Amino acid sequence: MAPQMYAPAISRMLNAEIDWDTDTIKGMLVTSSYTPDFTAHDYKNDVTNEVVGTGYTAGGATLASKTVTTTAANSWATSRANSTAYTLGAVVRPATGNGFLYQAVVAGTSGASIPTYPTVIGQTVTDGGVTWACVGRNILQFDAADLSWASSTITARGIVIYKDTGTAYTSPLIMADMNASDQSSSSGTFTAPFDALGVFYAFV
């Protein structure tokens, strides 16, 4: 899954129209028939094809244990290592911190020696089979407990996160995370795990 923010959510968060800590934030499941438009879609009423199934309530479930964390590059826990497999999207810092974070834009196994890290945001370096992009000096992470629906029969392609005001056309969208294929449960627990880096995140 690859979380992506709806563009209007960025300005709403900066304008304090969305408060991650105190607002009611929900996650709703959608089918493969919904295609997020991350530029034009701004409110819940733009989302079509919400999941219908046993154990699922329209509008989704409320996120619990929400946190917001800012971590400076040199304090990031994961440092790059030689001859190590990295997945797409992995974030590392150099073993000897240089004040920048790097994200894998091509997955693979790192080389046997330390690469020459770029220190201009957006520049990349090839490291064995991995390509790292310089992404920022800090990472801002918005996280919450994974969502789950017990005793459910559900088929979903993705999840949409939004602030629930109680009215669809005033409930701003925040992000969507779509799978490459459908995920299903049959009289069991359907779990929507969030990315290891958080529900969504940004580099600053």
Image: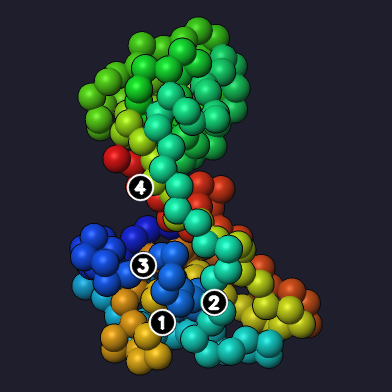
User: Looking at the image, do the residues carrying marks 2 and 4 touch, with CB atoms under 8 Å apart?
Assistant: no
Residue 190 visible, this orientation? yes
Q: In this figure, which residue is indicated by the disc labeled 3?
A: 19
What kind of element bears circle 1? loop
Residue 1 visible, this orientation? no
What kind of element bears circle 4? strand
Q: Quadrant of residue 115?
A: top left
Q: Whole-percent x and y of residue 37?
A: 28, 70
Q: Whole-percent x and y of residue 188?
A: 78, 77
Label 2, label 4: how many angstroms apart (C-alpha)?
22 Å
Which residue is at 58% across, 68% downward? 64
Q: Whole-percent x and y of residue 145?
A: 60, 62
Q: In this figure, which residue is indicated by the disc labeled 2?
A: 62
Count up the numbered dots.
4
Which residue is at 41% across, 43% downward? 70
Label 1, label 3: how many angstroms apart (C-alpha)?
11 Å
Label 1, label 2: how many angstroms apart (C-alpha)?
9 Å
Q: Which of marks 1 and 3 is nearer the N terminus?
A: 3
Q: In this figure, which residue is indicated by the disc labeled 1?
A: 164
Q: What is the three-letter code of the residue carrying label 1?
A: Asp
Query: What is the image's colouring?
Result: rainbow
Q: Nearer the viewer, mark 2 or mark 3?
A: 3
